[in-house]
Image (cartoon, rainbow, N blue to C red):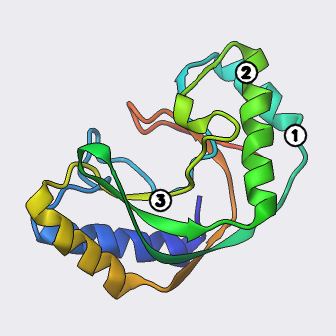
Amino acid sequence: MFDRRGDLLVRDLWARLEGEGIRTLSSHTHGRHHPHLSYAVLLSWDLERVVDALAALPDGGPFDLSFQGAQVFPRGRVALAPAVPAEVAVRQEAVARALVPTGAVLHRHYQPGHWVPHVSVATRAVATDLSKVVTAVSDTVPMIARVERAALVDSSTGELWSLPTVP
């Protein structure tokens, strides 16, 4: 999860796009999403076992992400593309490896060696809207956001459990 400034920068981008009629995480599903960088997406999990596994990992502390452009994924998903410090990629892999023994089912795109770091912007932009999204991202970057805390989030409800450290 980002610091206040980074959170506001992403939310401002979401609001500009929503004003253009382009869906973002601010209006996606329950509308309780937070700007974030995901280390892992779990398809099923046991909350207590996942919390225990993450608590056993060392606290890597806060870090900065530098955004320079956009990434376009299938089905109209567009994201901010961060430059990720090498240590953050190592931390993501440690999280993924720690979660597997809990019985959690890790989404294939978050398996070690398959993670594409991103911060979601548009959730289902149609082809004719892609130029608007990319223009809005281009008007926003370069941008630096500080990751200062970590949480488990149930993306189906928006429920959030803060973690005491940043793995």
Q: Earlier in the sequence, mark 2 or mark 3?
A: 2
Nearer to us of marks 1 and 2 is 2
Residue 96 sits in quarter:
top right
Residue 139 at x, y percent in the picture: 32, 87
Q: What residue type is labelled 2?
A: Val
Identity of the residue drawn at 80% across and 51% down: 90
Identity of the residue drawn at 27% across and 78% down: 136
Residue 155 at x, y percent in the picture: 43, 36
In what element is the residue under mark 2?
A: helix
Residue 123 at x, y percent in the picture: 27, 50
Q: Which amino acid does label 3 sit on?
A: Val
What residue is pinned by disc 1?
57
What residue is pinned by disc 3?
119
Q: How crowded is mark 2: few (under 14 residues within 10 Å), some or many (20 or more)?
A: some
Identity of the residue drawn at 9% across and 63% down: 128
Residue 60 seen in the figure: yes
Camera-side residue of 84 and 158: 84
**Distance Cα–Cα, label 1 vs label 2:** 14 Å
**Distance Cα–Cα, label 2 vs label 3:** 23 Å
Q: Residue furthest top?
A: 103
Q: How crowded is mark 3: few (under 14 residues within 10 Å), some or many (20 or more)?
A: some
Residue 55 sits in quarter:
top right
In what element is the residue under mark 1?
A: loop
In what element is the residue under mark 3?
A: strand
Q: Earlier in the sequence, mark 1 or mark 3?
A: 1
Labelled disc at residue 100: 2
Identity of the residue drawn at 38% across and 30% down: 156
Q: Earlier in the sequence, mark 1 or mark 2?
A: 1
- Direction from residue 140 to residue 5 in the image, left or right: right
Camera-side residue of 159 and 167: 167
**Distance Cα–Cα, label 1 vs label 3:** 23 Å
